[in-house]
Amino acid sequence: MNLRPAAILRGYALILLAVAATFGLHASSGGAATRPTVESVAQGLTCQCGCGLTVANCNHPNCEFAVPARAQIAKMISRGMTRVQIIAFFRKKYGDKILSAPPAQGFNLLAWTMPFIALAAGGALIMLLLERWRRATPSLPSGSEAVAERLPVTDPKLREKLEKEIREQF
């Protein structure tokens, strides 16, 4: 496999573009065209009771936050509000901590892209190091002559004995 570092980096760039395009399509499909459900909106909100789950998945039967939040979401949907509007309402009231995922804007965009950037940079670094190590390895002649030529034997009698033993074995 003889890949050049520039070709590898181009490959990683194409992968990153594909991931970014996929992420952009996923993020833009916010759901304004279809009527939201309580479940779909509640999945986007983190419960504030301390359980660490979303409002939809909070497992406390009488949760002081999730139960009223679900009821409020249902009222907002019945009034014709979209998922984006409902989440914006909760975000304005509680701040960004209410969101189950960081918004893909500003500094939070780094949280979304950094794993892919780190993976690509690590892969490129490994490929460059492998290429450098491959070039640094000297090519040696094959066979028993190569072994005999590399040995630092200075005594001619020992060298003859060694060459004789090598020839007898092969």
Image: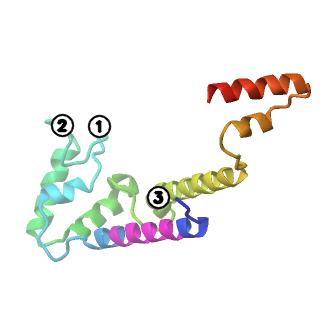
Quarter of the image holding residue 53? top left
Question: Is 128 displayed left or right of 55 in the figure?
Answer: right
The disc label shown at residue 51, or none: 1
Quarter of the image holding residue 2? bottom right
Is the residue marked by circle 1 packed among few (<14), some (14-19), or many (20+) residues within 10 Å?
Answer: some
Q: Is residue 105 above or below residue 33?
A: above
Residue 14, position in %: x, y? 45, 71
The C terminus lies in quadrant: top right
Q: Amino acid at mark 3?
A: Phe
The disc label shown at residue 116, or none: 3
Q: Are marks 1 and 2 in contact (CB under 8 Å)?
A: yes
- Which segment is the magenta one? 10-22
Residue 154, position in %: x, y? 91, 28
Q: Is residue 9 magenta?
A: no
The disc label shown at residue 59, or none: 2
Is the residue marked by circle 2 packed among few (<14), some (14-19), or many (20+) residues within 10 Å?
Answer: few
Task: Check disc 2 and report its element: helix, strand or loop.
Answer: loop
Q: Nearer the viewer, residue 121 or 62?
A: 121
Question: Is 80 displayed left or right of 99 in the figure?
Answer: left
**Disc 1 or 3, which lies upstream in sequence?**
1
Q: CA distance from mark 2 to mark 3?
A: 33 Å
Seen from this angle, which residue lies furthest left? 78
Task: Check disc 3 and report its element: helix, strand or loop.
Answer: helix
Q: Are marks 2 and 3 in contact (CB under 8 Å)?
A: no
Residue found at x 32% / y 38%: 50
Tell us which disc is closer to us: 2 or 3: 3
**Disc 1 or 2, which lies upstream in sequence?**
1
